[in-house]
Amino acid sequence: MTGVGEDLRAVRGRSASGCSGQQDERGSPGGTGHPKAPVIQGQGRDSATTPPASVRDYEPTPATWGRLLAVDRCDECGFVYEALATGEVPGALRAHAEGYGELILRPQPPDMVRTRPAPEVWSALEYTCHVRDVLLIQRDRVVLALVEDTPSFPPMYRDERVSLAGYQRECVAELVDELAMAANMMAKVFGGLSPRQLERRCIYNFPRATERDLAWLGRHTVHEAVHHLGDVQAVLTRVGGRAG
Ligand SMILES: [Zn+2]
């Protein structure tokens, strides 16, 4: 989980000048309006193009529920929750945030990071925006669970955020900085939890409403970062292949 940030600074330097350009004002590819989020954690990669009819925070298929509830392991990206010590969560969050920068700041054809491989599949930029928002929301959820006993959380409305939060208008270099900041903010809060606080409970809606502890929430946040980093890589490969 370390070492993904090498040469990031140099890459950022090459790309930062594109922030105020006209391309940042363009809308979503093809003007398709409001597609669904493509990937549910734990589903196969092929499911990225066949999202469920309605997705809020998460809404996996019954088969996915069973698999995820049986073992906290993601068949798609291979993430195993218990394999990550809680003490490793902060470093893993920061390291993977850097990984996004390496991918979306890499020199590539204009607008590649903003291009959806299919109308219903998020672009690399949209995935990255999603992860930034997840990190910010998870931080607040930790705080809430420290204050309230076994709170439940409102959904993040990830699909709605794409348009409502203006993902397509984001400046790539600014987004990378925001992602690093969000990862660091979550890492600091989580890294400050005592063993007793890690055992605080909450009701988490993934894959369906289940009582979890904050240790799980931290690992799950790393899983979000890991899983969607793979999504970004896959989307850029698909878009790049089509362009080539
Ligand atoms: Zn995964």
Image: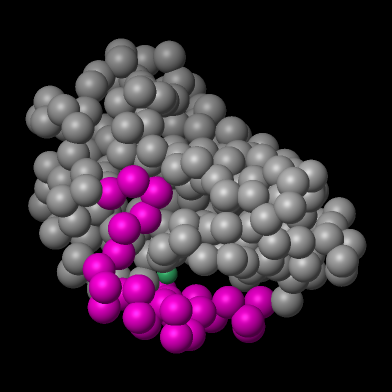
Decide if residue 198 is on the left or right side of residue 59. Answer: right
As for residue 70 lying within the magenta part, the answer is: yes
Q: Vertical placement of 231 versus 148: above or below? A: below
From this viewpoint, which residue is outermost toward the front?
A: 149
The one nearer the camera, 56 or 131, is: 56
The reply to whether residue 206 is in sight is yes
Image location of residue 164, percent across then percent down: 35, 23
The one nearer the camera, 133 or 231, is: 133
**Total of numbered circles in the picture?**
0
Image location of residue 203, percent across then percent down: 57, 58
Q: Vertical placement of 85 versus 113: above or below? A: below
Image: magenta residue range: 55-84
At horizontal 71% and vertical 43% (from top left) the residue drawn is: 144
Image location of residue 36, percent across then percent down: 22, 44
As for residue 143 lying within the magenta part, the answer is: no
- Which quadrant is the N terminus positioned in? bottom right
Q: Quadrant of residue 222?
A: bottom right
Image location of residue 231, percent across then percent down: 34, 59
Q: Vertical placement of 228 versus 131: above or below? A: below
At horizontal 42% and vertical 63% (from top left) the residue drawn is: 208
Q: Vertical placement of 132 versus 194: above or below? A: above
The one nearer the camera, 146 or 237, is: 146
The reply to whether residue 218 is in sight is no
Query: Which quadrant does ligand 1 occupy?
Result: bottom left
At horizontal 33% and vertical 46% (from top left) the residue drawn is: 56
At horizontal 30% and vertical 15% (from top left) the residue drawn is: 25
Decide if residue 59 is on the left or right side of residue 97. Answer: left
Q: How is the image coloured?
A: one colour
Q: Main secondary structure of the magenta part?
A: loop
Q: Quadrant of residue 125?
A: top left
Decide if residue 39 is on the left or right side of residue 155. Answer: left
